[in-house]
Amino acid sequence: QVQLVESGGGLVQAGGSLRLSCAASGRTFSRRAMGWFRQAPGKERVFVATISRNGAYTYYVDSVKGRFTITRDNAKNTVYLQMNSLKPEDTAVYFCAAPMGASYSGSDYYTGADDYGYWGQGTQVTVSS
């Protein structure tokens, strides 16, 4: 069982920055790829970013490339999402996610919501224009 707790959301003006954190319970964090998703009001949950278990491989949705950075600290069981140059369209609830099992390869990462079995409660990010 993995529990995920997000923090760091808030209200920021367009062009500003926020750093989201996701703290994971358990001793298997370092063996799992991790992901961030977001859900805007009235819309489906969508993929934002993912990182391999060793942190060497990352992948982003096109709309955040060059603005968002996903990192992890396996010693702290924490994954981060640094968000810069925020836009009003980034407004959403952001969710951290972990797959049900460990990654087979250190280069594995996952972009589909169906690849993940554990989810945090979400943290609200609101970007004002």
Image (spheres, grey):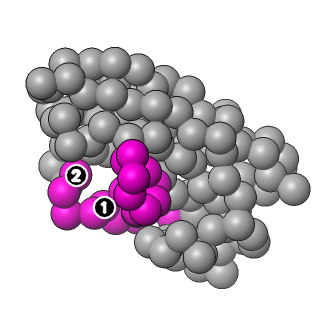
Residue shown at 19% from the left, 35% from the top: 88
Numbered disc 2: secondary structure: helix
Q: Which mark is residue 7?
A: none
**Range shown magenta:** 37-64
Q: In the image, 27: left or right of 45?
A: right
Q: In the image, 34: left or right of 37?
A: right
**In the displayed structure, would residue 78 be above or below residue 10?**
below
**In the displayed structure, would residue 116 be above or below residue 89?**
below
Can residue 56 be seen by looking at this rendering? no
Is 98 magenta? The answer is no
Q: Nearer the viewer, residue 121 or 19?
A: 121
User: Where is residue 119 shown, x and y percent of the image?
Assistant: 66, 53
Residue shown at 41% from the left, 20% from the top: 10
CA gap, disc 1 and disc 2: 7 Å
Q: Does the residue at mark 1 contact the one at mark 2 (Cβ under 8 Å)?
A: yes
Q: In the image, 88: left or right of 51?
A: left
The quadrant in which the C terminus is found is top left
Instruction: Please name the residue that numbered disc 1 is placed on.
Output: 60
Can residue 40 be seen by looking at this rendering? yes
Tally the marks.
Answer: 2
The quadrant in which the N terminus is found is bottom right
Which residue sits furthest right?
A: 1
Instruction: Please name the residue that numbered disc 2 is placed on.
Output: 64
Is 50 magenta? The answer is yes
Numbered disc 1: secondary structure: strand
User: Where is residue 97 shown, x and y percent of the image?
Assistant: 60, 55
User: Where is residue 91 shown, x and y percent of the image?
Assistant: 31, 37
Question: Mark 2 belongs to which amino acid?
Answer: Val
Residue shown at 28% from the left, 63% from the top: 61
Question: Mark 1 belongs to which amino acid?
Answer: Tyr
Which residue sits furthest front?
A: 42
User: Where is residue 84 shown, x and y percent of the image?
Assistant: 22, 32
